[in-house]
Image (tube, helix red, strand yellow):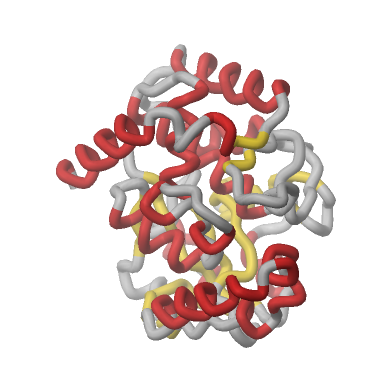
Amino acid sequence: MKRQLFLLIVLFAILGSVRGEGRVSYLQKDSLTICRLLDEAHALPSTTNFPLFFARKFLDIPYVAHTLEINDDERLVVNTRQLDCTTLVETVTALTLCAYRHLFTWRDYLNALTAMRYRRAQIDDYTSRIHYFTEWITLNTEAGIVREIQVPNPPFSAVQHVNVNYMSSHPKSYKALREHPEYVTAIRKMEQSITGGSFRYIPKQMVKNQALLRQAVNDGDIIAITCKKAGLDIAHLGFAVWKDGRLHLLNASMLHKKVVEEPMTLYQYLQKHSTHTGIRIIRINK
């Protein structure tokens, strides 16, 4: 683990200008928000639960899908004004990583976001971005950014056998693939590299056992909801929040049209979605 953290710090130093400031897309309000949040975090004790601290700063921010698809060329998009489930998780994780590493500048944040969103932290084209969350977990685990929790059993009593092909099978659903059909080959190759992986997860019926769950899931853990929709691995993302002894989900909600702490428990939430099968748990490394 120490070697991974060392490599991550070296990576940040190498990145420097994030392959050039021109590859970053943001408004002044976004940079001001990030700098303000990092300033606030700088004054907090190291015992602070930074994932929840940052996630709650985005409560009531509007839910907007496809905010990363606004440019003709691939750029690092920073948008704190509109979030979907993935960009909420990435924004909070990048802020948390900066707080844990005592890195409190705008450039530090850009480097952290680039390192977790792009393979080898290099922005080339659309295919260089990490699109499936299983790959996101794997590569960011290798970088020392996160780790996946898969024990004890129970509650991690089920195994997800990943088989992804949704993007290459539905290229017209993605703006970049419609405009650049030549990208589909690289996307299919990426999907084939992910397919075949097996990961332990908590089946949704087991989520009802709050006492057992409390031993495995911490406040601020990333919750990745597994699904049985053909060609996909993960249906939705959010953060774990314990309230009155019950697990809830803080997420960018399409239903509520904003970032919320779900009033219903996570168990109740999962039961309302027939394609949801359970949850994988990812923890940000300190």
Vertically, is 113 above or below 235? above
Report the side of 167 relative to 179 (left or right).
Answer: left
Report the side of 208 relative to 108 (left or right).
Answer: right
Of 69 and 45, the residue lying toward us: 69
Point 43% across, 27% down: residue: 108
Of 74 and 268, the residue lying toward us: 74
Residue at far left of view: 3
Q: Taking the image as drawn, is residue 276 in sight?
A: yes
Point 59% across, 84% down: residue: 231
- Residue 42, by quadrant, is top left
The image quadrant where one finds the C terminus is: top left
Of 239 and 72, the residue lying toward us: 72
- Residue 97, by quadrant, is top left
Q: Position of residue 118 (x, y in %)?
A: 47, 52
Q: Position of residue 78 (x, y in %)?
A: 63, 37
Query: Across the whole image, how many numbered discs are drawn on residues?
Result: 0
Vertically, is 106 above or below 282? above
Q: Position of residue 32 (x, y in %)?
A: 65, 19
Point 37% across, 80% down: residue: 198
Point 37% across, 27% down: residue: 47
Report the side of 270 relative to 164 (left or right).
Answer: right
